[in-house]
Image: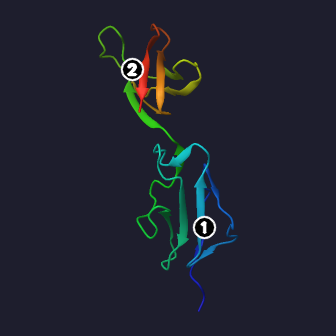
Amino acid sequence: CLPVECGQIAAQPQAKEEPPAITGPLKFGDATRFVCLEGHTLGGVPGGDDSYQIACQASGELTGMLDSLPGGPPAGSGICKLAGYTVIGRVTDAEDAKVPLANAKVTFKENGTDAEAAIVYTDRDGMYEARLPPGAVIMHAEMTGYIAREKGPIVVA
């Protein structure tokens, strides 16, 4: 009999493999552990899990599992992201707030420091989505032909 092989593990962005690293394809029963880089958690959930393992199953598939739930559900959010919150909004004209502004630049700065927390652009419907760290931010929206607007501080928690 030959052992079941699951193949190579794909690159794990924002995570590092804990030693001892497995070289070559994983075989049934092999597992390797990953830890998110500093400031990152699984799915970017503040205070969330920051490590997971990937194991080779008898079926020949690689599956990920949270360290906090050994043998538990797959780590579907097993992608390490900067811990924070997703903020979704819409930029419209100030006159009647009905005309969405596509390609408007939305900048979020940490309140009191002016350090940029995120810069995003709106889609064709004027919608934006930004990943922000916990804390207070100032939002600045601008677009050519319109007066720039600033709001805040906005508490992200």
Q: Nearer the viewer, mark 1 or mark 2?
A: 1
Find the distance from the CA under tag 1 to the CA under tag 2: 45 Å
Across and down, in percent, residue 54 comes to: 55, 66
Across and down, in percent, residue 151 comes to: 42, 15
**Which is more toward the observer, 67 or 12?**
67
| Disc sitting over residue 91 in the figure | 2
**What amino acid type is highlighted by mark number 2?**
Val
The residue labelled by disc 1 is 32
**What amino acid type is highlighted by mark number 1?**
Thr
Other residues around mark 1 within 10 Å, as few (<14) / some (14–19) / many (≥20): some
Q: Residue at x 48, y 17 (%)?
A: 140
**Which is more toward the observer, 8 or 64?**
64
On screen, residue 127 versus residue 33, left or right, reads: left
Marks 1 and 2: CB-CB under 8 Å? no
Locate the C terminus by quadrant. Answer: top left
**Which is more toward the observer, 3 or 38?**
38
- Observer able to see residue 41: yes
Residue sitting farthest toward the bottom? 1
In which quarter of the view is residue 96 placed?
top left
Q: Is residue 77 above or below residue 84?
A: below
| Disc sitting over residue 54 in the figure | none
Across and down, in percent, residue 60 comes to: 52, 76
Q: Secondary structure at mark 1?
A: strand
On screen, residue 22 versus residue 114, left or right, reads: right
Q: Is residue 37 above or below residue 120?
A: below
Dot 1 or dot 2, earlier in sequence: 1
